Each structure stands twice: as C-alpha cells, then as structure tokens.
Amino acid sequence: MFQGMGRTQQDLLSALLYQPAGMSIDDLASHLAVTRTAIRQHLAALERDGLILRGVTRPTGRRPEQLYLLSARGKELFPRQYQLLADLLIGEVAEIIGHDNLVRLMRSLGRKMAAGMEQQAVAEERIVSHMNQAGYEAEVFFRSSGEKEIVAHNCVFHHLAKAHPEVCELDLALIGALGEGEVEHLECMLRGGNVCRFQLTDTSPTVSGGHSLK
C-alpha cells in the first residue's frame, strides 16, 4: 500500500491516521524521533503528492503551530475492504432478484457507464481509451481479415465475476453501448482464456467521425 515510499514517510502517514485532528512538525519530530528539518522535507513531498494537507493552526504561547492532516487520498493508502463489500452486495442481490434480473441489472449498469462517457457511438479505438481509464489495459487488435477486436489484458471485475459470471454482462453492455453494436465475447479469462477478446458488430450506419465500425 506504500509502494515506493520510505519508512519515515510511512510512519508519518500512520501517525497522522491515529491523530485525525492533526499533528504539528514538533509533534511529528518527537513521535518519529527525527529532526524537524527531516519532517519538513517529508511533509513537503507528501503535500506535493496530495497525501496530506494543512489543517488549522494551533495557538501556543509563542508562534501558532501549523497542523497537518491526512488527505482523502492519503487515507486510501490504508487497507479498504471494498472487495468484501462488493462480494457481499452482489451475493445478496443475486439471491433477492435471481439470475435473469442480475443479468439485466449488469447490462443496465454497463449502459449507464457508457452514457457517462459518450453521447454518440464511437469506434473501437475510442472505446479502448475509455476502457483503459477504467483499468482494463485494453488495445485494438487487427485480424488478418482486417476486422477489429478489442483485447483486454486485465479483467477489472475478475474476483466478482468468478463468483457471479453475470458481472461480465456489464463489460459487454459497456462496449456495445459505446459502439452502438452487438458484442461477441470471443475469449474470456474466466473460461480459461489468456485475455478477454470482444468483437463489435456495427448496427448503425456510421459512428462519430463519419466512418463505419465494420
């Protein structure tokens, strides 16, 4: 969770986690047993990276002390159980609404995601760009016939989809809605494939930019 971060910076962030009201430079120097100069340098780096922020100043008998707090981004470095919650939610929803309705729900979510990305149909290259922003690590692959395929090297919902394959319908609906076409899932990591491969068949005359998806 603290990849590429030194021990002192890790300890500094942990100290701020336990003191949500904030800590001053003197507080941190005393707590971590390092110099005030070193604390200042680490705080500057962490503030630059958006992991901490400046809070209120604390009055003292002398000069007021600036307090430092963990930012929302800094808090996210610490373990979160989003995966556990997602597993529980999908499992509960599946029991309540059943397989067919879960499929419909995943397709609806995929279409809603697409609606937030584009207002008109786009080609595979643009679809891949959106997928990569979501972490799919996707690319457009050209077959010898000239047909395009979308190849995703990372299944962003892999853990969920292993327990509930209906989740894959979200990917299909996302791609289909972005390209306004039918999507064929040619290869799937959940079914033993090395990647997830999708082929989009255009169902509209043209897409943005005036060219066909075919």
Image (tube, helix red, strand yellow):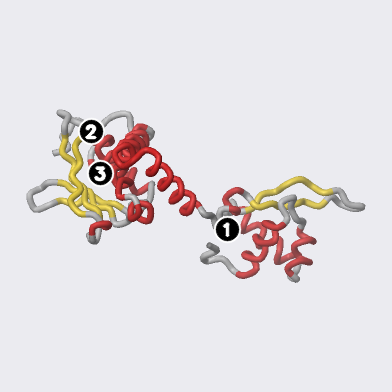
Q: Amino acid at mark 3?
A: Glu
Real-space Cα separation, disc 3 to disc 2, in angstroms: 14 Å
Q: Amino acid at mark 2?
A: Glu
Is disc 2 surrounded by few (<14), some (14 to 19) or many (20+) residues within 10 Å? many
Secondary structure of the residue carrying tag 3 is helix
Residue highlighted by disc 3: 125
Q: Is residue 105 left or right of residue 32?
A: left
Q: Amino acid at mark 1?
A: Phe
Q: Residue at x 16, y 32 (%)?
A: 203
Work out whether residue 200 or residue 37 is closer to the camera in this orientation and state it: 200
Whole-percent x and y of residue 130? 34, 43
Picture quarter with the C terminus: top left
Q: Residue at x 27, y 57 (%)?
A: 190
Label 3 close to label 1 by CB (< 8 Å): no
Q: Is residue 11 left or right of residue 30?
A: left
Work out whether residue 50 or residue 21 is closer to the camera in this orientation and state it: 21
Which circle's residue, 3 or 1, is located before the other in the chain?
1
**In the rendered image, which quarter is residue 123 located in?**
top left
Residue highlighted by disc 1: 78
Residue highlighted by disc 2: 180
Label 3 close to label 2 by CB (< 8 Å): no
Real-space Cα separation, disc 1 to disc 2, in angstroms: 40 Å
Whole-percent x and y of residue 115? 35, 32
